[in-house]
Image (cartoon, rainbow, N blue to C red):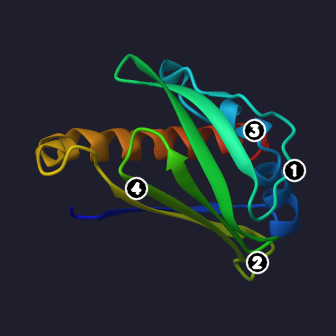
Amino acid sequence: MPSHLFESVAALPLPVAEVFPFFADIANLDRITPPELAFRTLTPGVAMRAGALVDHEIRLFGVPMKWRTRIARWDPPVEFVDEQVSGPYAEWVHTHRFRDDGQSGTVMTDSVRYRLPLAPFGEIAHPLVRFQIGRIFRYREKMIRQVLGTA
């Protein structure tokens, strides 16, 4: 089963000390996910730390499903990693990195390693899935800028 990698990089004109706390609040994930995914965090208020489990509901292509992630690494304000425990992918590992850009701004990098289910047949859907993931991250960046007041 092949793994795929998606990466998104965004520059925000705010210091890491202001950007990272936004991501430390799991409730903000609902705010930055496209509405058509009907994404909802079922464990609001969970303390973000290594080992924390977070349950979500999501609709992918109109199909409702549960998604459980585990915070595999928590290293504020530099990085955290969430991994799918159960959900729509055969594998989903999302690394969030934050670094100072040297001019009081933040470079935020999202790297997602994922595998599709139902291999090898699931690979047929990869172009559509990759397009959808890209669209989700473009929406996220737009909403992050709006919420943080940098739009």
Q: Amino acid at mark 4?
A: Glu
Q: Residues within 10 Å of mark 3 (few under 14, many from 20)?
A: some
The x and y percentages for residue 149 are: 79, 42
Asked whether disc 4 touches disc 2, contact meaning CB atoms under 8 Å apart, the reply is no
- Name the mark on residue 28: 3
Q: Residues within 10 Å of mark 2 (few under 14, many from 20)?
A: few
Disc 1 vs disc 3: which is toward the camera?
Answer: 1
> Is residue 83 in sight in this rendering?
yes
Work out how far the residue at label 4 is from the one at label 3, CA to CA, in angstroms. 23 Å
Of the pair 61 and 140, the residue shown nearer to us: 61
Along the horizontal axis of the image, is 71 left or right of 114? right
Q: Earlier in the sequence, mark 2 or mark 3?
A: 3
Which quadrant of the figure has residue 92? bottom left
Asked whether disc 2 touches disc 3, contact meaning CB atoms under 8 Å apart, the reply is no
The residue lying at 75 percent from left, 38 percent from top is 28
The residue lying at 38 percent from left, 16 percent from top is 62
Q: Earlier in the sequence, mark 4 or mark 3?
A: 3
Q: Earlier in the sequence, mark 4 or mark 2?
A: 4
Q: Is residue 39 above or below residue 119?
A: above
Work out how far the residue at label 2 is from the one at label 1, CA to CA, in angstroms. 31 Å
Q: Amino acid at mark 1?
A: Ala
Asked whether disc 2 touches disc 1, contact meaning CB atoms under 8 Å apart, the reply is no
The residue indicated by pointer 4 is 91
Q: Amino acid at mark 2?
A: Gln
Q: Amino acid at mark 3?
A: Asn
Which quadrant of the figure has residue 40? top right
Secondary structure of the residue carrying numbered label 4:
strand
Along the horizontal axis of the image, is 27 left or right of 79? right
Disc 2 vs disc 3: which is toward the camera?
Answer: 3
The x and y percentages for residue 45 are: 87, 38
